[in-house]
Image (cartoon, rainbow, N blue to C red):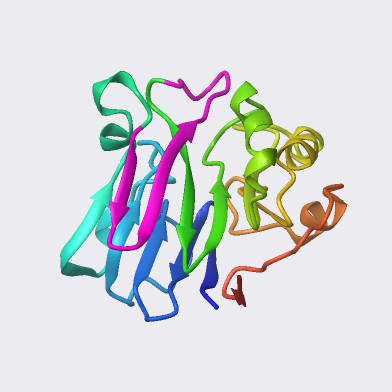
Amino acid sequence: MPKLYYQGHGSYRLTTNDGRVIYVDPYAGDGYDKPADIVLVTHQHGDHNQVQLVTQKSNCRVITNEEALAGGKHNTFDVGDIHIEAVEAKNPLHSPKECVGFIIIINGVSMYCSGDTSKTTLMESFASRKLDWAIFCGDGKYNMAPKEAAECARIVGAKHNIIVHVAPGKLFDRAKAEEWDAPNKVIVEPGEEIEL
């Protein structure tokens, strides 16, 4: 099974069955020493784009919001058998012209990574995809509040839901995560790795 290591804030690392490594929004926590095959950046705010923290393989593919939105559309990338699809992300502090989320498929496991967003109309189309995992932001300051993030989890309908980016200035807030009223909730602490 592929694995997710939560670094804290909106940062996490995915590892495939054969050891390939994907970092999403590097910024917080530790665990950047595993050489990256892919680095994904949802937008250029400083708490999501610290690519220099990541040890990169010589052929590492860095896909930022700029590549994801090249040509004025949401682009799709296949890096070997890893599928990455940019999707809409937006809220009053995050322009849809500068921000994305991602749907990632590794080892047959599908995951929605929201980036910094509020509810979008596109989320309604995700339910038919029967995603395995969804990761939502939910701090209520720079992003949607936990109540809206729980509503999004119900709309997306993934088998498992994780909340991140819940406490600006801190890696995580366990109490806020426990209060999050989403179905099929899985709480992951910074420094914890889970099988997907």
Q: Pick the residue in front: 48 or 99.
A: 99
- At horizontal 52% and vertical 30% (from top left) the residue drawn is 89
Which image quarter holds the C terminus? bottom right
Which image quarter holds the N terminus? bottom right
- List the single residue furthest toward the bottom: 18
* Image-based side of 49 in relation to 158, left or right: left
* Image-based side of 119 in relation to 71, left or right: right
Q: Pick the residue in front: 116 or 157.
A: 157
- List the single residue furthest toward the left: 58
- At horizontal 37% and vertical 80% (from top left) the residue drawn is 19
* Image-based side of 138 in relation to 97, left or right: right
- At horizontal 38% and vertical 25% (from top left) the residue drawn is 98
- At horizontal 32% and vertical 56% (from top left) the residue drawn is 39
Residue 9 in view in this figure? no
Q: Pick the residue in front: 131 or 189.
A: 131
Q: Quadrant of residue 31?
A: bottom left
Q: Quadrant of residue 41?
A: top left
Q: Position of residue 54 (x, y in %)?
A: 29, 64
Q: Which residues are magenta?
A: 75-96
- List the single residue furthest toward the front: 128
Q: Position of residue 189 (x, y in %)?
A: 66, 68
Q: Is residue 12 magenta?
A: no
Q: Is residue 85 magenta?
A: yes
Q: Is residue 48 above or below residue 90?
A: below
Q: What is the number of callouts on the image?
A: 0
Q: Position of residue 183 (x, y in %)?
A: 84, 51
* Image-based side of 127 in relation to 184, left or right: left
Q: Pick the residue in front: 131 or 165.
A: 131
Q: Is residue 153 above or below residue 17?
A: above
Q: Is residue 67 above or below residue 39?
A: above
Q: Position of residue 137 (x, y in %)?
A: 63, 43
